[in-house]
Image: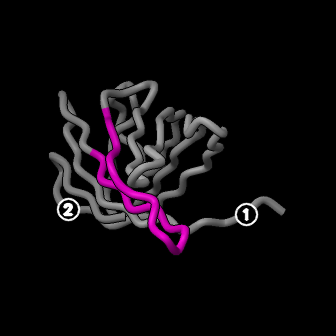
């Protein structure tokens, strides 16, 4: 993950854990962690890691993905790629704005 916020540029780790139903409806969670400085949780508290629930959809025509954070104003847009990766951009306006770029690899359940 590469990010820019009111606190400057950050590099960190992120994961998403999602389930997609037959209609393309997505539910799951998103987590992030940084070893450099801090970010903010949904209450505005400075933290080095956080997680929250996300919901969304995938368009079967072009594999575009849209996700929304359930506890904050952030929204993700991106694509499911042919190799199974999901590339997303998060934009979160407001009191603690942030923009993030992600590339997630698929890991199947055991």
Circle on res. 108:
1
* Circle nearer the N terminus (2, 1): 2
Residue 26 in view here: no
Left/right of residue 99 with respect to residue 55 in the rendered view: left
Depth order, front residue of 15/66: 66
Q: Position of residue 39 (x, y in %)?
A: 33, 46
Which residue is tagged 2?
A: 9
Which residue is painted at 37% across and 64% down in the image? 1
Residue 1 in view here: yes
Q: Position of residue 58 (x, y in %)?
A: 47, 44
Point out the stretch of residues depicted in magenta. Answer: 74-90
Is 79 within the magenta? Answer: yes
Which residue is painted at 18% across and 28% down in the image? 95
Distance CA(mark 2)–CA(mark 1): 31 Å
Circle on res. 11:
none
- Mark 1 neighbour class, 10 Å CA radius: few under 14, some 14 to 19, many 20 or more: few
């Amino acid at each position: 993950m590469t990010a820019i916020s009111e606190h400057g540029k950050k590099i960190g780790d992120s994961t998403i854990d999602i389930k997609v139903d037959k209609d393309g409806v997505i539910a799951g969670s998103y987590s992030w962690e940084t070893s450099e400085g801090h970010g903010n949780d949904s209450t505005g508290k400075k933290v080095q890691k956080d997680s929250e629930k996300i919901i969304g959809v995938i368009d079967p025509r072009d594999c575009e993905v849209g996700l929304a954070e359930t506890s904050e104003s952030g929204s993700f847009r991106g694509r499911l790629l042919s190799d199974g990766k999901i590339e997303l951009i998060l934009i979160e306006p407001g009191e603690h704005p942030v923009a993030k770029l992600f590339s997630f690899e698929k890991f199947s359940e055991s």
